[in-house]
Amino acid sequence: MARKDFIDDGYSEEEIYSGGSKDVQGHSTNLRTTVPDPWMAAMGELISSPDWPEYKTSQHFVRDAIFHRLHWTLRQTDRKSNDRVKRLVAMSRLTAEINYRAMERETYQTLLTELRQAFRDAHADGDEMGVREMIKEVESTLDQIPQPYRSQIGDEVISWDRRL
């Protein structure tokens, strides 16, 4: 793979590469390090922020940081000595994307399952006001959910709204 191909191979500084901890063959290596307390506090703030849902744990954040630094460093170094590493990083980017999509799919499927159960429970308890409040809450955030999950969740909300 040519240097320019690697650098331009779909990489984006804005993209978050925090997906799975294993490559496509299921391999991984544990990495252990210590960081200053203020760094951990800052990571904790980002991880708990709704602005960065991709960072569910500090491991997601660290994998993303390592990937970005690897990409930057490889752009700065001599092409001849790094072709193999560049291929590995390119495969890692693809694996991270695949894992992220699987994690996203699982997250929204869990959300839909839990939402259905919450509607059923409130309805079974005769809590029509609770059902209406959940409908209103979900509708207010529906535009932030990507397709096809938005349609699935929206259909569930419409179904419950019609029942009331």
Image: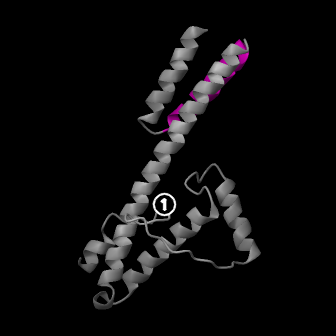
Please identify the quadrant where the N terminus is shown: bottom left
Report how many numbered discs are placed on residues in the image.
Answer: 1
- Place residue 141 in its image quadrant: top right
Is residue 73 inside the magenta stretch?
no
Q: Residue at x 61, y 55 (%)?
A: 56
- Place residue 91 in its image quadrant: bottom left
Mark 1: amino acid? Gly
> Which stretch appears magenta?
127-145
Residue 117 is situated, as x and y percent measured from the top left of the image, at 62, 26
The image shows residue 77, relative to residue 63, as above or below, that is: below
| Residue sitting at the far left | 2
Say what secondary structure mark 1 lies in: loop
Q: Residue at x 44, y 49 (%)?
A: 102
User: Horizontal placement of 56 versus 6: left or right?
Assistant: right
Which residue carries the number 1 mark? 20
- Place residue 45 in its image quadrant: bottom right
User: Horizontal placement of 141 versus 45: left or right?
Assistant: left
Residue 12 is situated, as x and y percent measured from the top left of the image, at 40, 64
Residue 27 is situated, as x and y percent measured from the top left of the image, at 44, 69
The image shows residue 11, relative to residue 147, as above or below, that is: below
Is residue 139 inside the magenta stretch?
yes
From this viewpoint, is residue 27 visible? yes
Q: Main secondary structure of the magenta part?
A: helix
From this viewpoint, is residue 136 visible? no
Q: Residues within 10 Å of mark 1 (few under 14, many from 20)?
A: many
Please identify the quadrant where the C terminus is shown: top right
The image shows residue 104, relative to residue 42, as above or below, that is: above
Q: Residue at x 39, y 55 (%)?
A: 98
